[in-house]
Amino acid sequence: MITVVGNLKGGTGKSTVVFNLALWLLDRGTKVSVYDLDPQATLRDVADLRAEEGFEPRLSVGTTVPKPGNGEILIDVGTSDMEALRAAVSLANRIIIPVAPSQADVWSTQRFLEIISQSSKKRPQLFGFVNRADTHRATRENDETEAALRQIAGLEVLPARLGQRIVFRHSFSEGLAVFELEPSGKATQELNSLAEAVFTSVNKR
Ligand SMILES: Nc1ncnc2c1ncn2[C@@H]1O[C@H](COP(=O)(O)OP(=O)(O)OP(=O)(O)O)[C@@H](O)[C@H]1O
Ligand SMILES: [Mg+2]
């Protein structure tokens, strides 16, 4: 299965999500190959840091469009290389779109889906979820964003959110997954729900 994590908007958490999902799969004994097609190379940088720190398992990160193979393939794509983005999208079996809780992010998700439909004949499964969700109970942006995403034809909203939590930043800057830094934290619970929604429930359909 080739999974692309993408979005037209920057900073929505693509690299954070790929890194954590890849380590989550490795932790469960699933073979996973990771590719960073973003010239920013954030994923390669964090994998290098992880190797320098001696954390196991190591994450080896490819930089060219992969060939379909065994196990899970995760691809992080930015938008500064639209050719790489289109190539990745055309190979994808599923595309996961992290969306920050705002109307602008919903609009850009719609634009991204247009690019996907122009780039892929495969009709990949399309999943959106709210990342960087506001953790204050009183705010309505998370619910409103999910509701708006549900209105987009062809997009399935995953039953999981990642909150705006400092541990996502801290763990990443140390070369660790959130479950390695804070195994009992809320971020770990959220990551588990996201990963299970993507790799367990969805595969069983
Ligand atoms: N759930 C979260 N909680 C807190 N911070 C987060 C969360 N997700 C991502 N971040 C932070 O937001 C910033 C952007 O995340 P990340 O680099 O993963 O996004 P990106 O979509 O890959 O960005 P780019 O478009 O620049 O490649 C980083 O500082 C990251 O640590
Ligand atoms: Mg990135």
Image (tube, rainbow, N blue to C red):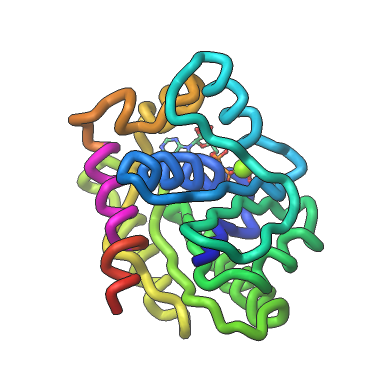
Q: Main secondary structure of the magenta part?
A: helix
Residue 189 lies, in percent from the top left, at 22, 42
In this rendering, the answer to whether 47 lies above or below 189 is: above
Instruction: Out of 10 and 70, give the one closest to the viewer.
Output: 70
Query: In the shown orientation, is residue 49 left or right of residue 24?
Result: right
Evaluate whether residue 45 shows in this view.
yes
Is 194 a magenta residue? yes
At 65% across and 68% down in the image, what residue appears? 89
Residue 169 visible somewhere in the drawing: no
Where is residue 19 drawn, in percent x and y? 49, 40
Residue 25 pos. (x, y %): 38, 47
The extreme front residue here reads 70
Task: Tell me which segment is drawn in magenta.
Answer: 187-197
- Which residue ends up furthest to the top in the rendered image? 53
Residue located at (65% from left, 53% from top): 77
From the viewer's side, name the closer residue of 73 and 99: 73
Which quarter of the figure is the C terminus placed in?
A: bottom left
Eyeballing the image, is 32 above or below 92?
above
Vertical arrangement, residue 98 with respect to residue 156, above or below: above
The residue shown at (22%, 47%) is: 138
